[in-house]
Image (spheres, helix red, strand yellow):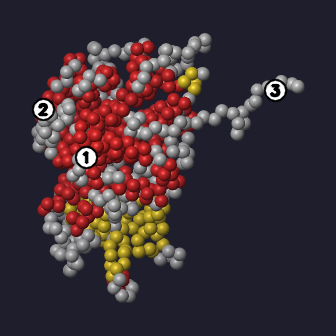
Amino acid sequence: MAEQGPIPASAEAGFVFSMSQPENPFIADPYFQRALAAYLPEDILAEVVPAFTRFAEATISPQVKEWNLNAERQQPFVEKHNVWGARHDVDRLVTSEGWRALRKWGAEEGTVAIGYETRYGKYNRIVQHAKNYLFSPVSGLTGCPLSMTDGTARLLRSQLPGLPASHPFHETYDRLTARTGSWTSGQWMTERPGGSDVQNTETWARYAPLSSKTEGEHGALDQGDYLVSGFKFFSSATDADVTMLLAKTESGKLSAFLAPLTRTVAAAEDGGGGGTGKVVTNGVRIHRLKNKFGTKQLPTAELELKDMRAHLVGPVDRGVATISHLLNVTRAWAFVSSIAAMRRGLGISKQFAANRTVFGYPLWALPLHLRTLADIEVRVRGFTQLGFFTVSLMSFTENGFPESGTLKASPPLPDPGEAATVVLRALTAAAKAVTSKNAVVTMQECMEALGGVGYMDDPDEPENVARALRDISVNAIWEGTTNVLSSEFVRHVLNRNHLEHINSWLSKAIDGVGNRDYREALQASWGNLYGRLRKNKDYIFDVLSVGRSVMFSFSWIVVGVLLAWDAQRDGDELAGEVARRCILNGEGGLREWLLPDVGVPSAAARFDESKERAKWDCRLVWGKELPDFAPFGQRIPLGSKM
């Protein structure tokens, strides 16, 4: 009998790669746990760690995966007319079961509510965004309306002390911050004349109070004193219950308004008989849904508003100042989701590398691939510090600063009061911009790390890095593009005495860095940046022309300070290696955007391409020592032995 030759592969037979089951994302993320241990006191940490472990396990459950796949497969659409051609009383925005379930799950888990509950006191924003860090990668983009809900709740909370108990904002706030039976809020600002240039708004509000109201002086939520008409070009919470929006009053200046999307009328008022209440649109009509590059699960629409009855929020003609509370909140959601996306992408890349064999050797141990993963790890660690430092400052400015000794090692916070507010505003703009920009670059690197499969966009694949790249790209645009935020950052820093507040805080923080090489490198960079800003304080347009480099340079210095603090608080060797690479070598994802005299590699920098560097790479990425067989780069030479 003739000997059978090699069996060729076929469509159904031969090698088929398979990914291992994903690990619990909280347990598999030791640096996130380390960050929480730095920013939370021991009693709160002991309470939330088991809760986060259980929640993280739910994020990789079959149910949550199915909700996400359903939201991707069944994208939203609009039904405007019935079978006879009559317009529905309310345009019917049809979203998937998965989308609705994910949003409900997120609300019930407290992704908004934790920020307003008293359980964690001064630390509630830190706990809230730690949970959102775990929720965001599997949220199906429901984090977008939830973030706007959070922003509206924060804005209303600032207004409630001056309003009577009968005002409908009290009930609205309660519903927005509830875990069950909760409402969501939109945030409709963008119009055709310009995105962030809201002064060109073509939406107008006319003062036209009702002659009688059902519930006291201010009436019900759908009985506001203004009628708003105009056209909103982007609305990403089209299926919300209420919305915040900007409109011009008769003065031609912007005011902020809150309005429900529907209102209840008597049937007789709508042309029917009897007095039964009927829900109709509150002057909102969907012109069309947007066809976007990503975030396809999320319904984004163009909306026509015609006599939308709304309540004024804050002082008349002070709309931009009024919504400033909202911007800090929504930008925090953006940068936390960007950091979480980078970590998620790196996790998928590691999962692939752990199971892939190349040239007969494990991909995870090849130093060139390992270097790529380590570069991402350094980047993610720096942005994790930047993000959660900013969130902690937000939490403390809202709820009070912690007493001395509450934390094992206090982070380098600014002084409470005006200084903290000034620094927070600068950090939220900078953190949102630099993390979102880097998330796009990082996710592309993660996609490339999977080879051709990473480029596949299969809606039924839960580990779809291509979709993740499409979706995370929006964070560099919404709530301000990189250049818009750079301009805002420069204007804020050079306004009044803000630069001196920032200098006082950052200089003190740098002086507290124990490592001499780190401290001198950071002092040199901040000295150059501060000197440039102080010299050109009266020439703002000169600074605006390099605004992006200014903001990224500031961010690099802050990240360096935080990584140095993280390393020295307990002497952790891995934290020290990350700090060294960032501060002395200028690594960490920001180098290409810095000013030429900021982040320059120090005289103490080491660009060691030897096996020693690969060993540190392996410790950073895998938490273990590099195998002896892997010091050769991407392609191991023929004849080498394991």
Three-letter amino acid code of the residue under disc 2: Ser
Residue 449 seen in this snapshot: yes
User: Within 10 angstroms of label 1, few (less than 14), some, or many (20 or more) residues?
Assistant: many
Residue placed at 32% from the left, 41% from the top?
A: 49
Is the C terminus in the top left, top right, bottom left or bottom right quadrant? top right
Of badges 3 and 2, the one in the foreground is 3
Q: 300 or 49: which is nearer to us?
A: 49
Q: 8 or 625: which is nearer to us?
A: 625
Q: 460 or 434: which is nearer to us?
A: 460
Marks counted in the figure total 3
Residue placed at 35% from the left, 56% from the top?
A: 108
Q: CA distance from mark 1 to mark 3?
A: 67 Å
Residue 528 seen in this snapshot: no
**Horizontal and vertical percent position of residue 214:** 23, 78
**Horizontal and vertical percent position of residue 424:** 20, 41
Task: Determine which quarter of the picture holds residue 640.
Answer: top right
Residue placed at 18% from the left, 39% from the top?
A: 423
**Horizontal and vertical percent position of residue 123:** 22, 44
Circle 1 residue: 125
Of badges 2 and 1, the one in the foreground is 1
Circle 2 residue: 504
Circle 3 residue: 4
Q: CA distance from mark 2 to mark 1?
A: 25 Å
Q: Secondary structure at mark 3?
A: loop
Q: CA distance from mark 3 to mark 2?
A: 80 Å
Q: Which mark is residue 426?
A: none
Three-letter amino acid code of the residue under disc 1: Arg
Task: Determine which quarter of the picture holds residue 528.
Answer: top left
